[in-house]
Amino acid sequence: MKETSFIEQNKEKWKRFEKMQDAAVSNPEELSDLYMDLTDDLSYAQTFYKRRTVRVYLNQLAQKVFSGVHKQKGDTFRKLINVWKTSLPLEIYRSRKNLNFAFICFLIYAAIGVISSQMIPNFENIILGDEYIKQTNANIKAGNPLKIYEDTDQLQMFIRITTNNLKVSFLTFFVGFFFTIGTHIMLFYNGVMLGAFQNFFYMKGLLITSFLGIWIHGAFEISSIVLAGGAGITAGHGWLFPQSYTRMQSLQLSTKRGLKIMLSIVPFIIIAGFLESYVTANYQNLSDWSKWLLILLSFGIILSLYVIYPIYVARKHPHLVAHEDSEIKPKNTSFNLEKIRSLGEIVSDTFRFYNTQFYKIGKVIFAFILPISLLLIYLQDINHYQEMKTEYWYDWVCQLKIIFGYGYKNTQDLVVLFIWTFVFAFVNTTIYWSFYTQNESFSWKSFFQFSKKKYISIWLGSVLIFIALLVSPWYVMILAILFISFFALLSPTLVFDNASLKNRIKKGFSFSKNHFGNTLLLFILIIGFIALIAQPFGFVFSIYNEQTQEPLVMSDLLDVLADFTKRIAKIYTADYMVISNGLRQFVYIIFILCVLPLTIIAATFGYFSELEKSEAIGLKKQFEKFGKRNRFIETEEDFE
């Protein structure tokens, strides 16, 4: 049949199909019949009109159906509102005993601070520091007791205070995993400090003055610390008291619950930083009634959101109180790769896949990739030995320059930087191999056979990404993420597609372009989450102050550990800083090797999602299964 005759014969049917496809309401039986006719016409066009426009038109029309069938409803603003309206209040209500316990403990610790200040001479100096007491006494004599909160650069003050408060709160939460002991230590430290602080001003006859000045921001700041303590106790109790779950299952549930509470207080920590920088700093210019109003309003908001409203929601939805929103996935979950995933599904499945495949991925990383990485670091430390003798406050930027060689001090730096691309390509290889063998047990033979077959393609597909990461300074990293997103799906396309190299490269760039927005958002979400949880252990936002040789904010756990190592190393060697910096580098490379798989897994799920949009492999398989399911007996088909 001539193409013109073919078009003339079927064009009315195609127009009818387009109208029904775009209509809000359609007859499903008629639409199904038209779709079957359309697929027949497409098969005919693919056979006889391979290079003609009609084949492209029919293919696009059929693809609309494939995408429509798989189309997922995106996350809407209404869902976010529902989280604050129902989901979060229920989580707070379920954790009310732990939150109340944290509040009571904090009051007790604050009382200990007050009593100790009255009974122990110079207790305030021990807790608050001699310099602070000396400066505050001078300010009291000058008639401005809270002058220490005044700062000419309010923006810098806001950034410094907010980042410090975020770190303190998240540290209070995360150390709860250590049988909740760490959380109690943080609550004790802050409670005693608050008690000693308020008693100091009480003894000076300035209790009301200090209260009206400090609690303008303190209402949100102290409440956030207490809530963070309650969230940490909630997380720790999952490990201590698993009830009917396994300890790991209970820990998963309690961690998610505690983390939801933690994330909910972030806005209030930011507001507290703003109030301290811009309002408390000008407290003398405010009337007393406005100070009281701000303090009562702040406490009212906290009391309403974390006490009154959760009780109201729990009484309104009693059937939801005992319901766990966090479904526990079985460890042996198999992932269907022939489906289109929404952005939220990719994020969720990324963490689930990493969890289920962690034994495989971890074994390759720690037994094979890590030793190679440590050898490169050792060579770089020798190459930069004088720099290794230097102490850097919050030095992750400086240490990574040494590790990866992007300081470009000599030829070895360039050579090592290039070698790192091959090392990181093995991380990609590990992830892709895990996708290939997700239902198989670990086997070194299987891994090296896969590497032999696919490694060159993996390296070619990822070398531009790794070079962009390795050569980009931290302050232009967001631009590097933009660049990386253009190439993110190239590597998995080269690995999983069976076309010629030229067609695979072309398809990889096409998929990367189509998925660019989702890839960029995915990377920002994952990197942001990783940076957030890393704060108490290795402060990502820390900056080395080269002028004062001092940290801009308080030390994190890595700083404490490195300082302890330095003190011990002083006993045995004059180059004790080399040992301390070596410890930092070891922690950094472990962290990088553990979090890098998350971005690779997310990109791989993005590739399979784009593949399904393009070729509808999974949908076609579902069509083939029509009529094969038994109405009365469940079969394997029902569980796919």
Image: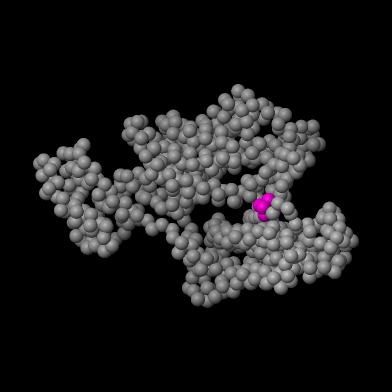
In magenta stretch: residue 32: no
Q: Quadrant of residue 141?
A: bottom right
Can you give x and y, in whole percent of width and height, for residue 194 in the image? 76, 63
Question: Is any part of residue 111 visible from this angle?
Answer: no
213 left or right of 239? right
How many marks do you count on the picture?
Answer: 0
Q: Quadrant of residue 158?
A: bottom right
At x 20%, y 39%, the residue is: 52
Of 260 and 431, nearer the camera is: 260
Question: Is any part of residue 616 visible from this angle?
Answer: yes
**Magenta segment:** 155-160
Can you give x and y, in whole percent of width and height, for residue 482 in the image? 49, 42
Can you give x and y, in whole percent of width and height, for residue 347 in the image? 47, 51
Of 516 and 372, nearer the camera is: 516
Majority secondary structure of the magenta segment?
Answer: helix
At x 60%, y 31%, the residue is: 406
At x 81%, y 36%, the residue is: 571
Q: Is residue 404 above or below residue 440?
A: above
Quadrant of image for the N terminus: top left
Q: Is residue 187 above or below residue 39?
A: below
Q: Residue furthest top?
A: 411
380 left or right of 428? right
307 left or right of 38? right
